[in-house]
Image: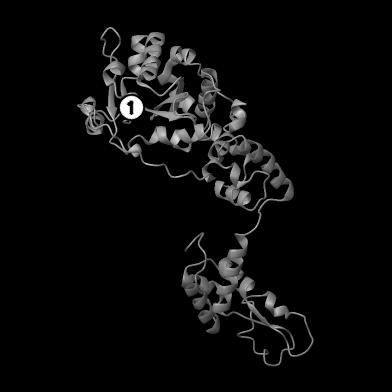
């Protein structure tokens, strides 16, 4: 017997045929491998009525009993009641209409819809995604994520599509031509070298690194790092996008964290071919020649080789739109932004936030020195109001 599946047109044609030959509902159910109650509901719900030639609008008492139609009634030619018949094609059309209508509209009452709006709209306007909200309030949400998207599209909430971060369209980036053809700094540090290392130890921890520039080419910029296993990001404000400023960040981390913690966190680094990163020896070694890291470079114009850091830059741009200068900000601002991003739940982490995922890996000493702290789910803000 087929359970929990809808009747097909073939099933309905079979029902019509068996009814015309006098089968009982039980006999039809056995013939098409369905339950008698399914056959009974199908006939009662999808039968076609034909009005009586007189003005009598009453229904024949026999239609309330199996088989619920007049096909085998001996008196049907003399009957003054409305008559009922089962036609497979008409029943199929009725079913398809009912199915379509059932998938339209709002399935919540007015009170439930208001409650949903009060939950979602303030959090969406703070820059939170539906994934994060569902992770934090799963017990309070009676519908699926797709349904919430539909409600927002239909303007049922105060929040609109413009408040959904992923709905924002970004301009296509212009490709830059690298005029410096000296790639000797990449010897033994290419992406293929990184792949070989990763294939030998797929569980190794490494860091993806990049920079985010503000409006002014020579103004302040951000040095960003992410631990891909945990989606955990660090953000450092630099006075300018130069090799000296990048090295200053690494020296500061080396002295603050100590060799043991530093080498555990920043042992392997994967970055792009930006001019600010073209002094690998200074990054890899301390001022006293102690080897502390190994840096590798992606292929030119291949940002997809470090996808985690590129994707997380979207969170930064939600708070600080492209074209805005970083000159007004301090490192405290960037630490605040970093904490809000790292407290944001991710589907890729099965509903956990990066901070929880990386807590044991980062360790208490590094967490304290880097100003890492968790933000409560409903207090997370990922739009421009965060740094006002």
Spot occupied by residue 193 in the image (x, y as percentages of width and height): 22, 30
Q: Tell me if residue 206 comes above or below residue 56 in the rendering.
A: above
Coordinates of residue 73 in the picture (x, y in percent): 64, 86
Quadrant of the rendered image containing residue 293: top left
- Residue labelled with disc 1: 275
View extreme (right): residue = 55
Q: For label 1, count other residues whose C-alpha is less than 10 Å away and answer few (under 14), some (14-19) or many (20+).
A: few
Q: Quadrant of residue 247?
A: top left
Q: Is residue 336 visible?
A: yes
> Quarter holding the C terminus?
top right
* Residue 234 seen anywhere in this rendered image of the structure: no
Image color mode: one colour
Helix, strand or loop status at disc 1: helix
Q: Is residue 105 above or below residue 379?
A: below
Identify the residue at horizontal 74%, vertical 88% (top origin): 80
Identified at 65% across, 57% down, the residue is 105
């Amino acid at each position: 017997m087929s359970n929990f599946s809808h009747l097909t047109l073939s099933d309905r044609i079979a029902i019509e045929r068996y009814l015309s030959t006098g089968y009982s509902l039980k006999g039809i159910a056995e013939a098409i491998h369905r339950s008698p109650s399914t056959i009974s509901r199908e006939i009662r719900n999808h039968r076609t009525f034909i009005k009586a030639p007189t003005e009598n609008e009453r229904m024949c008492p026999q239609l309330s009993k199996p088989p619920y139609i007049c096909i085998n009634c001996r008196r049907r030619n003399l009957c003054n009641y409305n008559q009922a018949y089962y036609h497979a094609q008409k029943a199929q059309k009725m079913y398809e209409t009912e199915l379509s209508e059932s998938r339209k509209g709002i399935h919540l009452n007015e009170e439930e819809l208001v409650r949903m709006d009060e939950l979602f709209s303030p959090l969406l306007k703070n820059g939170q995604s539906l994934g994060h909200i569902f992770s934090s309030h799963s017990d309070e949400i009676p519908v699926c994520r797709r349904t919430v998207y539909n409600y927002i599209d239909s303007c049922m909430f105060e929040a609109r599509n413009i408040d959904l971060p992923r709905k924002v369209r970004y301009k296509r980036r212009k490709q830059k031509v690298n005029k410096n053809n000296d790639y000797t700094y990449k010897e033994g540090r290419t992406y293929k070298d990184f792949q070989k290392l990763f294939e030998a130890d797929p569980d190794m921890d490494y860091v993806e690194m990049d920079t985010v520039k503000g409006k002014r080419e020579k103004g302040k910029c951000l040095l960003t790092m992410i631990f891909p296993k945990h989606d955990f990001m660090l953000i450092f404000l630099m006075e300018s996008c130069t090799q000296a400023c990048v090295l200053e960040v690494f020296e500061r981390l080396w002295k603050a964290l100590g060799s043991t913690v530093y080498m555990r966190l920043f042992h392997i680094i994967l970055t792009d071919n930006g001019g600010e990163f073209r002094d690998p020896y200074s990054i890899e070694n301390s001022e006293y020649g102690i080897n502390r890291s190994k840096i590798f470079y992606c292929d030119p114009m291949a940002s997809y080789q470090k996808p985690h850091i590129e994707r997380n830059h979207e969170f930064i741009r939600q708070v600080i739109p492209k074209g805005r200068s970083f000159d007004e900000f301090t490192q405290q601002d960037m630490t605040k932004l970093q904490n809000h991003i790292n407290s944001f739940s991710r589907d890729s982490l099965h509903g956990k936030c990066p901070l929880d995922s990386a807590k044991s890996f980062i360790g208490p000493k590094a967490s304290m020195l880097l100003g890492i702290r968790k933000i409560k789910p409903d207090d997370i803000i990922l739009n421009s109001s965060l740094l006002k």
